[in-house]
Image (cartoon, rainbow, N blue to C red):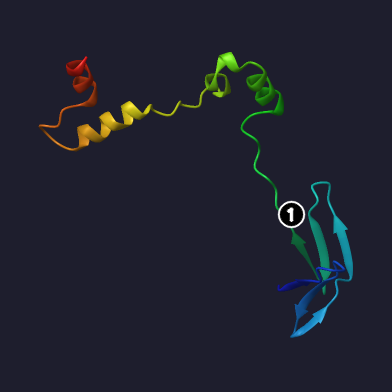
Amino acid sequence: MQRAVNPQTGEVLFLVDNQWVPPAKTAKNDAGDTAYLVGNQWEVVKIARLPEPILSPEEVTSAIDAPSAGLASLQKPGVPKPPSELAMLEEVGKGAGAGVIGLKSMLKTLA
C-alpha cells in the first residue's frame, strides 16, 4: 500500500482506491516500528536500524588509551586478519604463471 508522509507535520496518508486517507488507528512497539490501521488491515512501517557495532565503545577506548598495543588490539577473536600487502602481491605473482619470481625470493636475492 502506498504511503505519503508530510515532512513538516509528520501526517501519514495511505492510498486506498485512488484516495489518500488517514489511518483509523496508530500503534507503536518498543522497537520504534509503527503500525497503521487502514481500512481493515494493519500496515507496519519498520524504522531503519543501524547494524550492530563490531567493537564496543569500551574496546575502542581501550585501544586508543593503549596505543602500544597497536591495531592488533582491535582484532576481534575469530575474525581472520587481512593479509599483508606482501602476501597479497605474492598471491598475484603465483597467479601470473610459471616463470614469475615471487617477491619474497626477490627480497632474499637483494638482501
Instruction: Tell me the quarter of the image containing the C terminus.
Output: top left
The amino acid type found where label 1 is placed reads Ile
Residue drawn at x 32%, y 31% as measured from the top left: 88
Q: In x, y percent, where is residue 31?
A: 79, 47
> Considering the numbered disc 1 on the image, is that residue within a helix, a strand or a loop?
loop
**Measured along the vertical axis of the image, is residue 52 above or below residue 57?**
below
Toward the viewer: 50 or 34? 50
Q: In x, y percent, where is residue 38?
A: 82, 72
Furthest residue toward left: 99
Horizontal side of 73 relative to 82 (left or right) equals: right
**Measured along the vertical axis of the image, is residue 26 above or below residue 78?**
below
The residue at which mark 1 appears reads as 47
Residue drawn at x 85%, y 71% as measured from the top left: 23
Quarter location, residue 94: top left
Toward the viewer: 3 or 38? 3
Furthest residue toward front: 110
**Measured along the vertical axis of the image, is residue 42 above or below residue 67?**
below
Q: Residues within 10 Å of mark 1 (few under 14, many from 20)?
A: few
Horizontal side of 62 relative to 10 (left or right) equals: left
Quarter location, residue 110: top left
Quarter location, residue 86: top left
Residue drawn at x 81%, y 71% as measured from the top left: 6
Instruction: Tell me the quarter of the image containing the N terminus.
Output: bottom right
Q: In x, y percent, where is residue 92?
A: 25, 35
